[in-house]
Image (cartoon, grey):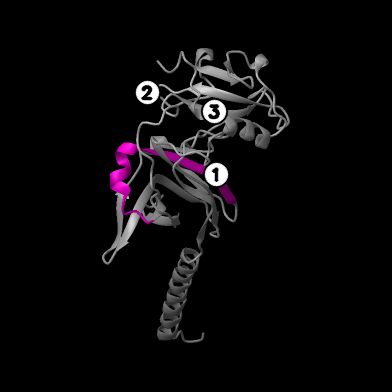
Amino acid sequence: MWPIEWKTVSTSLVILVLGGILGYLGRILIESRKRIRFITRDVYFGPALFWNLFMGRNYPSENAISFECEIKFFSERSQTVGLHDFRLQFCHKTLLGSVVDFEPDMQRVYRDMDKKDGPHLLGAIELQSRTFISFQLSTYIGREHWQKMQHCTFVRLRCKTAEGRIKHFTIDAICMPSMPPEGMDGTQYMSVQVTPTNYPQTSNPMSLVIMAARRREHEQTNLFTIAPEDLRYWDGTGWVKSKAEAKVYSNMDEAHSDGEAVKIWNLVPNEWGS
């Protein structure tokens, strides 16, 4: 029998164990350095009502600031990454770091509001390996919060990983707009939309009507469940109750031009303005 060199065996085992540990740590390090990419498009921050597709950015609201953007996540990691506890944060930088000036209630930060099916709130999301997740994000900020935001210079999205680590994704730089004084008629009573004639059953971009939805205090306007008495349609000269009597437009620009000519957002039906 050959004599066993126990010293050689033990040394080899130590080398194998250390090699395995170093290899494992190396794989963890490589995996941790794989990025979660965060891309934003079409960022808008300024005086507008986010749900008001007609006025949009053409007419300022004295009641709200609108924030809108498209967000895309892309994970380069090999395992699914879970993100939760999202916060939209309006911030400014100081010598000591970033300061959060304002966080809107996430129940008022909406995801994909233009889609009939939800989810419409930003809850937990799972990032599959090398797969894009994209959605529209929007919110409105009431006049009572503007003072907190005077020094804001950028907006970011904060969230947590499944391990409880906090991550920050910068969306874009912002500039606090000069807002109009309170008291303009119209926007406090209603919002004006351009909508397909038979929406939401089908969406025909060649058959549009202008619709006014009455806004009630402390209630979010929901066009899917709004009562008929809170809807009016433009017939070219005034508001009517029936969509069948409404003037039909062949495209969005035609409807906008007609509405802009009479400042339609200020033409509140008499029965709504009292």
The boundaries of the magenta stretch are 132-153
Viewer-closest of 70 and 21: 70
Question: Residue at 54% of width from left, 14% of height from top?
Answer: 228
Image quadrant of residue 143? top left
> Which residue in the protein does label 2 denote?
217
> Which residue in the protein does label 3 denote?
264
Q: CA distance from mark 3 to mark 1?
A: 31 Å
Residue 145 part of the magenta-drawn span:
yes
Q: CA distance from mark 2 to mark 1?
A: 29 Å
> Which residue in the protein does label 1 denote?
135
Count the numbered circles shown: 3
Mark found first going from the N terminus, 2 or 3: 2
Q: CA distance from mark 2 to mark 3?
A: 21 Å
**Residue 96 located left or right of residue 181:** left
Going by the numbered disc 3, the residue's amino acid type is: Ile
Pinpoint residue 92: horizontal percent, then vertical percent. Answer: 33, 57
Question: Is residue 116 among what the camera can see?
Answer: no
